[in-house]
């Protein structure tokens, strides 16, 4: 074997070892940064779609609120919101508002069902009931 071949194999081995050490070091740094960032939990409070590809978001990070615009090409911070700048910002935490939700339907009693079926109900179901009733 030629000396240059052995020399290049040694250099390749040392390079791979250095890259391995560098990747482990960067992983440790990244874990420290991620643990630091995990203290700031982010939550999308509200989203408004402006067009097909653009949106406005109100994002809560920790105790701070931000207005953020987003489209296909970029995301940009518009402003930081304070409780004084947007009236009713606290109410976003309880979204959806219970007044927006439909009222629960009242369960019908048997008497109400019978009153509907004996009335002038023009549904196909009532027609079949009347056509095959025993008293006809």
Image: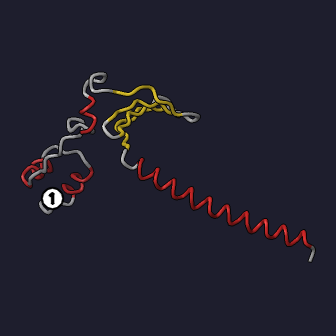
* Residue depicted at x 47% and y 50%: 33
Q: Name the residue at the left extreme.
A: 111
Horizontally, residue 75 falls left or right of residue 113, namely right
Q: At which x and y percent is residue 70?
A: 50, 33
Residue 57 or residue 132, whichever sits in front: 57
Q: Can you say which quadrant of the picture contains the N terminus?
A: bottom right
Q: Can you say which quadrant of the picture contains the C terminus?
A: bottom left
What colouring style does the render use? Answer: secondary structure
Q: Quadrant of residue 95?
A: top left
Tell me: residue 64, above or below residue 36.
above
Tell me: residue 92, above or below residue 110.
above
Q: Name the residue at the right extreme.
A: 2
Q: Name the residue at the top extreme.
A: 85
Q: Which residue is mark 1?
A: 136
Q: Name the residue at the bottom extreme.
A: 1
Residue 134 or residue 83, whichever sits in front: 83
Q: At which x and y percent is residue 55?
A: 46, 32
* Residue depicted at x 20% and y 39%: 98
Q: Quadrant of residue 63?
A: top left
Tell me the SS state at disc 1: loop
Q: At which x and y percent is residue 92?
A: 28, 35
Residue 68 or residue 33, whichever sits in front: 33
Horizontally, residue 9 falls left or right of residue 69, namely right
Disc 1 crowd, CA 10 A, few/some/many (<14, 14-19, 20+): few
* Residue depicted at x 13% and y 45%: 119
> How many marks overall?
1
Q: Quadrant of residue 24?
A: bottom right
Residue 52 or residue 15, whichever sits in front: 15
């Amino acid at each position: 074997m030629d000396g240059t071949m052995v020399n290049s194999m040694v250099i390749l081995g040392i390079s791979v070892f250095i890259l391995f050490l560098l990747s482990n070091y960067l992983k440790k740094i990244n874990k420290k940064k991620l643990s630091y960032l995990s203290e700031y939990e982010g939550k999308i409070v509200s989203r408004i779609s402006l067009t097909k590809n653009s949106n406005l978001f109100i994002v809560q990070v920790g105790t701070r609120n931000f207005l953020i615009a987003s489209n296909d090409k970029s995301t940009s911070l518009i402003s930081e919101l304070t409780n004084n700048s947007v009236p009713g910002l606290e109410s976003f935490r309880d979204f959806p508002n219970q007044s927006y939700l439909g009222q629960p339907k009242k369960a019908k009693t048997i008497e109400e069902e019978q009153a509907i079926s004996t009335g002038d109900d023009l549904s196909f179901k009532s027609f079949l009931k009347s056509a095959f009733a025993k008293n006809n």
